[in-house]
């Protein structure tokens, strides 16, 4: 059943319950007797009603205080369901190479994401010619897909020999496209930022090989032109402690924090690569990690309100090989420690859509000791903060976009319940995967 069929089913219920003179506008409807999981207070609001008008939440109130009227569609089939903000995957890639990544396959995956409960994604660099088309069609409803917030990429000049940048720039030159710019000390940063905005990008992603001076100039100009800046957590040679205070709103990838004070210790890293697993392996990695100190980095992220997008999912595969296992073992402990220190951690998959943000949520719980509520906040409120859209999305509040996920079972009891999808609402439209 597609979402249009689902809506027609609701309409049938409506017209059989309304009097002949009643007016009905499906642009306004009430979802009654639901249990709202409030990621702001981290409490469950039992037996509430949510009123939707067009694409926004127009009211939230206890069901006992809601008075039905014939001009508002009442949807009672959600009674007793658990409703959370629509999930946000804070790290995806949909158009690294649009010639190889077929549009029809992208649409298929995007639909699957939406029906799983993901109502927005942050695309972290690709060909914006393809992304702008996908994003436009998702926003207006021409395709069933999450809202797509995409980036324009800036990096140092030496980065643009990377094959991924060449693939993304086909038809032009890598490093010279308006959405993929090589930056040096002579760059016209005001023009580069303006051109990035001209691509329709929602953010500028800083990738690699930028100096602190260049980063600061980009962020300063981006603030003037009102576009957020997202960054990798380290840029050779620039360290995390030089990036975090610059004004970026998020930093990505747990492993890159190691470039602050660990990666130059070749002897230590080589010992990790050579370590062979034993029955006391967890104890070994605990001891190795506890000898490290990232407190300065955590404190900087907290001080400057920078969201940490660690992408634990992409490191899981490294756990399978002796020489790379250390990346996963150190990263998952770092994420746990950062979270316990008070760092805002956003959930992003970065798996080229092999898995979605729900898998990252489960890893955060099972590997980094997040509670299910913590993981939900990471995949909603903090993911919205990392993207720069918290004023519109990420929580269930009056005036915000009607992006909601209804679940059959309480995800706070068990993170796996995030998969018990009953209904998805994106921009006020209803979708059902059954």
Image: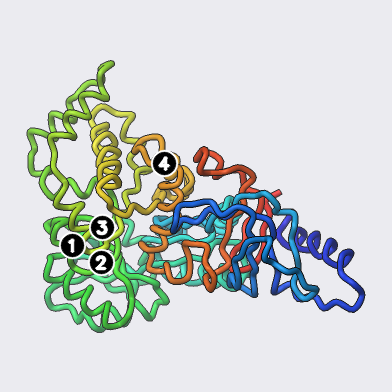
Q: Residue at x 20, y 49 (%)?
A: 257
Q: Secondary structure at mark 2?
A: loop
**Position above or below: 265 against 27:** above
Q: Residue at x 33, y 52 (%)?
A: 345
**Residue highlighted by disc 1:** 243
The reply to whether dot 2 and dot 1 touch (C-beta < 8 Å) is yes
**Residue highlighted by disc 4:** 371
Q: CA distance from mark 2 to mark 1?
A: 7 Å
Q: Secondary structure at mark 1?
A: helix
Q: Residue furthest front?
A: 64
The reply to whether dot 3 and dot 4 touch (C-beta < 8 Å) is no
The reply to whether dot 3 and dot 1 touch (C-beta < 8 Å) is yes
Q: CA distance from mark 2 to mark 3?
A: 10 Å
Which mark is first along the chain, 4 or 1?
1
**Position above or below: 345 against 229:** above
**Residue highlighted by disc 2:** 248
Q: CA distance from mark 3 to mark 1?
A: 9 Å
The reply to whether dot 2 and dot 3 touch (C-beta < 8 Å) is no
Q: Position of residue 343 (x, y in %)?
A: 28, 53
Q: Secondary structure at mark 4?
A: loop
How packed mark 4 is, by other alpha carbons closer than 10 Å (few <14, some 14-19, many 20 or more), is: some
How packed mark 1 is, by other alpha carbons closer than 10 Å (few <14, some 14-19, many 20 or more), is: many
User: Is label 3 or label 4 in front?
Assistant: 4
Which mark is first along the chain, 3 or 2?
3
Q: Position of residue 306 (x, y in %)?
A: 27, 61
Q: Residue at x 65, y 49 (%)?
A: 81
User: Is label 2 or label 4 in front?
Assistant: 4
């Amino acid at each position: 059943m597609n979402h249009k069929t689902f809506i027609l089913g609701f309409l049938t219920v409506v017209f059989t319950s309304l009097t002949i003179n009643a007016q009905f506008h499906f642009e306004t409807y009430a979802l009654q007797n639901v249990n709202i999981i409030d990621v702001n207070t981290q409490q469950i609001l039992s037996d509430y009603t949510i009123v939707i008008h067009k694409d926004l939440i127009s009211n939230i109130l206890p069901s006992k205080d809601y008075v039905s009227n014939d001009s508002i569609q009442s949807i009672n089939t959600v009674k007793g369901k658990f409703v959370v903000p629509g999930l946000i995957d804070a790290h995806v890639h949909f158009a690294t190479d649009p010639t190889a990544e077929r549009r029809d396959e992208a649409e298929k995956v995007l639909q699957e994401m939406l029906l799983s409960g993901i109502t927005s994604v942050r695309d972290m660099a690709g060909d914006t010619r393809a992304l702008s088309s996908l994003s436009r069609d998702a926003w207006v409803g021409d395709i069933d897909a999450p809202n797509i917030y995409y980036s324009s990429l800036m990096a140092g000049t030496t980065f643009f020999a990377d094959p991924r940048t060449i693939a993304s720039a086909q038809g032009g030159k890598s490093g010279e496209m308006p959405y993929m710019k090589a930056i040096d000390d002579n760059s016209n940063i005001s023009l580069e930022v303006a051109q990035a905005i001209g691509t329709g990008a929602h953010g500028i992603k800083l990738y690699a090989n930028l100096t602190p001076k260049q980063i600061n100039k980009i962020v300063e100009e981006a603030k003037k032109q009102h576009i957020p800046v997202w960054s990798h957590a380290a840029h050779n040679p620039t360290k995390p402690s030089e990036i975090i205070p610059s004004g970026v709103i998020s930093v990505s990838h747990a492993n890159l924090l190691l470039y602050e004070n660990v990666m130059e210790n070749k002897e230590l890293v080589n010992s990790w690569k050579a370590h062979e697993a034993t029955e006391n392996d967890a104890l070994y990695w605990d001891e190795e990690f506890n000898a490290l100190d990232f407190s300065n980095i955590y404190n900087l992220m907290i001080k400057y309100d920078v969201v940490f997008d660690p992408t634990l999912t992409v490191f899981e595969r490294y756990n399978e090989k002796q020489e790379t296992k250390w990346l996963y073992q150190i990263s998952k402990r770092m994420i746990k420690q950062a979270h316990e220190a008070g760092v805002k951690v956003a959930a992003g998959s970065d798996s080229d859509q092999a898995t979605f943000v729900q898998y990252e949520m489960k890893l955060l719980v099972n590997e980094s000791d997040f509670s299910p509520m913590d993981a939900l906040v990471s995949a909603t409120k903090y993911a919205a903060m990392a993207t720069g859209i918290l004023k519109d999305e990420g929580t269930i509040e009056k005036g915000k976009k009607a992006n909601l996920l209804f679940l059959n079972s309480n995800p706070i009891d068990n993170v796996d319940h995030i998969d018990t999808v009953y209904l998805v609402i994106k921009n006020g439209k209803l979708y059902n995967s059954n």
